[in-house]
Amino acid sequence: MPQNLNEKINDVLADRQLSISAITRELKEKGFVEHRLVLTGYLRALRDLKILQEIEVPPSKVYKRLEYHEKCTDIYSIIGDQIKHMDMEIRLPLAVYIISKLFKRPVFREELLHLGMNSKIIANYMESSDCLISISKDENLKLYRNEITKISIPANDPAYELKKEDIKLISIANNILLETIKDFVDISGLTPKTKQTKLVEM
């Protein structure tokens, strides 16, 4: 594989997001011919390295470039990476719970799109019998939209909130937030080398 393939992918994805097929096609036009499976593995490696963001657009996936400041501060990419392998029946309400707790307000659909979901996924989940979220009727939604400046929220974008807090959901969310902290903070030298099986009673 050419050593500067990463650079070429970076150029192809400048200011846009593309599917694997589209990336393969554009690379071929630039003289880079790789088998689709090889390229898929390479793109996933770049995703794991936080160089690219992978977004589900059923039935395929699209990739977008993450700039340096995005890789460090984009909360949507950080949380999205932590929950992307979960089933949608838990993934979507989990996203709503975490983001609403962090920002102390309902979660807009545009934010869920930034977390790697899409309108069809959201609509299908809202129609399911096990749906744990509802469309927010918060009277301050217009104010919230105007106060969000890091991403653009459409004027009539709906917002979502949990119908009620779920113990299982809270437990999973806590684990995700702990793992996120460990990903970004060096805790070596602070944790025991041997696994603790029981807390010492005080």
Image (cartoon, rainbow, N blue to C red):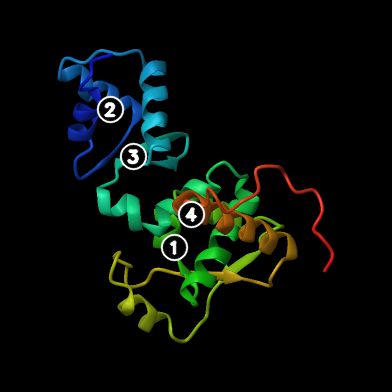
In front: label 1 or label 2: 2
Q: Is residue 43 visible?
A: yes
Q: Earlier in the sequence, mark 3 or mark 4?
A: 3
| Residue located beneath label 1 in the image | 109
Q: Earlier in the sequence, mark 2 or mark 3?
A: 2
Residue 161 percent across, percent down from the top left: 56, 71
> Which one is earlier in the sequence, the residue at label 1 or at label 4?
4
Q: Which residue is mark 4?
A: 79
Secondary structure at badge 1 equals helix
Q: Position of residue 22 (x, y in %)?
A: 28, 28
Is residue 79 toward the left or the right of residue 6 in the image? right
Which residue lies under the disc numbered 2? Answer: 23
* Amino acid type, label 3: Leu
Name the residue beneath numbered marker 3.
Answer: 52
**Cβ atoms at labels 2 and 3 below 8 Å apart:** no
The residue lying at 38 percent from left, 37 percent from top is 49
Front position among marks 4 and 2: 4
